[in-house]
Amino acid sequence: MVKEIERAGIPVVHICTVTPISMTVGANRIVPAIAIPHPLGNPELPADEEYELRRKLVDKALEALSTEVDDQTIFEV
Amino acid sequence: MSKFKVVHYINQFFGQVGGEEMAHIPAEKREGPVGPGLAFTKNFGDDAEIVATIVCGDSWFNENLELATETVLDMVKEESPDLFIAGPAFNAGRYGVACGTICDAVQTELGIPVLTGMYVENPGADMFRTKVLIVSTADSAAGMRRAVPAMAKLALKLVKGERIGASVEEGYIPDGVRRNFFDKKRGSTRALEMLLKKIAGEPFETEYPMPTFDRVPPMPAITDMTKATIAIVTSGGIVPKGNPDRIESSSASKYGSYNIEGVDDLTSETYETAHGGHDPVYANEDADRVIPVDVLRQYEKEGKIGKLHDWFYSTVGNGTAVASSKKYAAEIAEKLISYDVDAVVLTST
C-alpha cells in the first residue's frame, strides 16, 4: 500500500514495528513503532505519557516527510 | 544407524499455548516433538527424530529480533542437532519472519542445514528466500498435510548431504541459485517448443524468468508542513465501532473510507479494530494507538500541519493478498489526489 500511494505521487511515511518487512516491501520513509498490536501507544504508560510517546512518533513521521531521501531510510525515534 | 537429531521451531499457536493473546510469550524449549512436529516425526521414519521443540510467541520474536534470535540460537546450540526446521508458517507474516530469521542465524552460526516452509507471499519469503531454503506451502494451515511431507523429504536430503535439485522439482521457493543438470533435449529444441506453445496460446514455463525489482523512487519531501494536508491510511483495521463495512479480520476483500471531520480523539466507544492477526485489546481500548488522530488533530489546531484530511482509509493487512492491497491503495491514492492531499502517514500493526 505504501508503494502504490507513493507511486501515485504522494510521499508516504510508514510507521510500523517490524521494519525489516517495511524495507522488503519497499517503503522509502520508515519510522519504527512501539509494538505490533499498539504501534503508536504503550498501554502500560499513564495516559499523558502515552500521548507524549505518540507525539514523539508523529513528530518523527512529520520530520521524515519533510526530509529528502534518495533511498530507503529508517528514521529512529 | 542412529537417527539424525532435529530441533523444531514453532509459534505459540502451533505450540498449543494459545492464539493472539499468547503471542507475547518468550521462547521456551520442550523435549521431543510438539504439534506439527508429530507429523514430521511420522514422515522422518527411522531416519531422524525431533529431540526438542522451541515454542515462541510471534510478537515477542518480532518485537525483540536480536534478543529472540540469540535466545533461540542458544536453545538450539544446547541440543547440538544435525538439522533445524522452522514452521511451516504458511501466510502468517510474523511467524514467517521469525522462521526466516532464526533459520538464517542457525545456518550461519551453527553451520547445520536448516529448512522452513511458507506461502510465497509471506513477507518472510521475500526476506529470506536467497538465504535459507523455504518450501513453498499453501497460505493456511489447511495445507499442513501437503507441506509436512514435502519439507520432511527435502530436510532428509539436506541432512544426508544429498544433491538438492531445482526448485521446481523439490518444491522450494526459488533461491536464486542455479542448479545445473543435463536435459535430454538441447536448448534450441526446448526454445522452439516453447515458442510453438506461445504461438498456439498454450501455457509454457520459461527457463529463465526475469527478476522483478518493484521499487518506487521516493517522492520529494514536504517543504512547508504548516500548509500540508496530511492523510492517515492504515493496514491496522481501525473502523468505526461495529465495523459498518464488515471488513474481514483476515484476507480483507475491501477497505473502508471513514470521515473524521470534527473528531479530536478516538475512543473505545466510537472506534475499534477489525484486525484478526494480533491481540485487538489495545487498539479497541484506544484506536489512536494505531492511527494517531488525536495528535494530528492537535497539530492541526496548533498550525504545525496545514490540515488533517477529513477521511482516513483502512483495511486489514492480515493474510491479505498483495494484489488486493495494491488495488485498494491505488483507489485510495486516486481519492487522496482528488482531495489534494500532500502526504500520507501509513501505519501497520
Image (cartoon, rainbow, N blue to C red):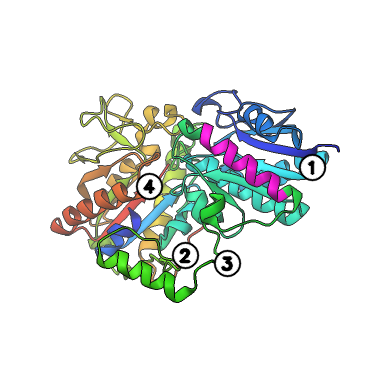
Where is residue A20 shown, x and y percent of the image? Answer: 52, 54
Q: Secondary structure at mark 2?
A: strand
| Kind of residue indicated by mark 2 | Thr
Is residue A62 one of those drawn in magenta? no
Q: Earlier in the sequence, mark 4 or mark 3?
A: 3
**Local SS, label 1:** loop
Which mark's residue is nearer the viewer, 4 or 3?
Answer: 3
Tell me if label 1 and label 2 are in contact, CB under 8 Å.
no
Distance from Cα at disc 1 to Cα at disc 2: 39 Å
Callout 4 secondary element: strand
On screen, residue B100 versus residue B201, left or right, reads: right
Q: Are marks 2 and 3 in contact (CB under 8 Å)?
A: no
Q: Is residue B156 magenta?
A: yes
Task: Provide residue B276's location: percent of width, then percent of height.
Answer: 40, 31
Q: Nearer the viewer, residue B29 or A68?
A: B29
Q: Which residue is mark 3?
A: B178
| Residue corresponding to mark 2 | A73
Start and end of the magenta stretch? B145-158
Quadrant in the rendering for residue A31? bottom left
Q: Earlier in the sequence, mark 3 or mark 1?
A: 1
Q: Is residue B223 visible?
A: yes
Same subunit, tags 4 and 2: no
How far across and down, in percent of the image, does residue B52 sit? 75, 32
Q: Which mark is residue B41?
A: none
Q: Which amino acid type is shown beneath numbered disc 3?
A: Arg
Q: CA distance from mark 1 to mark 4?
A: 40 Å
**Chain of the residue on which disc 1 is drawn:** B
- Residue that numbered label 1 is attached to: B81
Could you tell me which chain the residue with mark 2 belongs to?
A
Mark 2 or 3: the one toward you: 3
The three-letter code of the residue at mark 1 reads Pro
